[in-house]
Image (cartoon, helix red, strand yellow):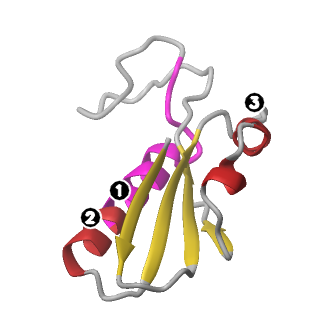
Amino acid sequence: LVGIIQNGTSKRAIGLRADMDALPMQEINTFEHASRHPGKMHACGHDGHTAMLLGAAHHLAQHRNFDGTVYLVFQPAEEGGAGAREMINDGLFTRFPMDAIYGMHN
């Protein structure tokens, strides 16, 4: 999934990337936001990664204090599923040309 936020006239573009996959493990906590799917959970911070990218998207869409394009890359299958490779093979950088792409891990 790739979102696009454009502002101004610059041809410059960056990508912001977050992984969003669930892992095959049972969540044992009782938080209200715990997984509702037995044997699957957003461990390793993946729910946080997605939330941070959505927060960045919201901020950029509201303030638009940049000139160019920001691609919001929500990558599946980060944990051993080769999601990045599949997105690249599917034309990620051809369809969404970027000068740089940034990701983080919490």
Q: Residue furthest left?
A: 62
Q: What secondary structure is the stretch in magenta mostly built from?
A: helix
Q: Give the residue at x 50% y 27%.
A: 41
Q: Residues within 10 Å of mark 3 (few under 14, many from 20)?
A: few
Q: Quadrant of residue 28?
A: top left
Percent position of residue 84, x then y:
73, 44
Q: Which residue is mark 2?
A: 58
Direction from residue 31 to residue 87 in the image, left or right: right
Q: Is residue 35 left or right of residue 74?
A: left
Three-letter amino acid code of the residue under disc 3: Gly
Q: Which residue is mark 3?
A: 81
Q: Marks 2 and 3, Cα distance to the nearest angstrom?
A: 28 Å
Which of these two is toward me, 31 or 18?
18
Q: Nearer the viewer, residue 90 or 86?
A: 90
Q: Which mark is residue 54?
A: 1
Q: Is residue 103 above or below residue 31?
A: below
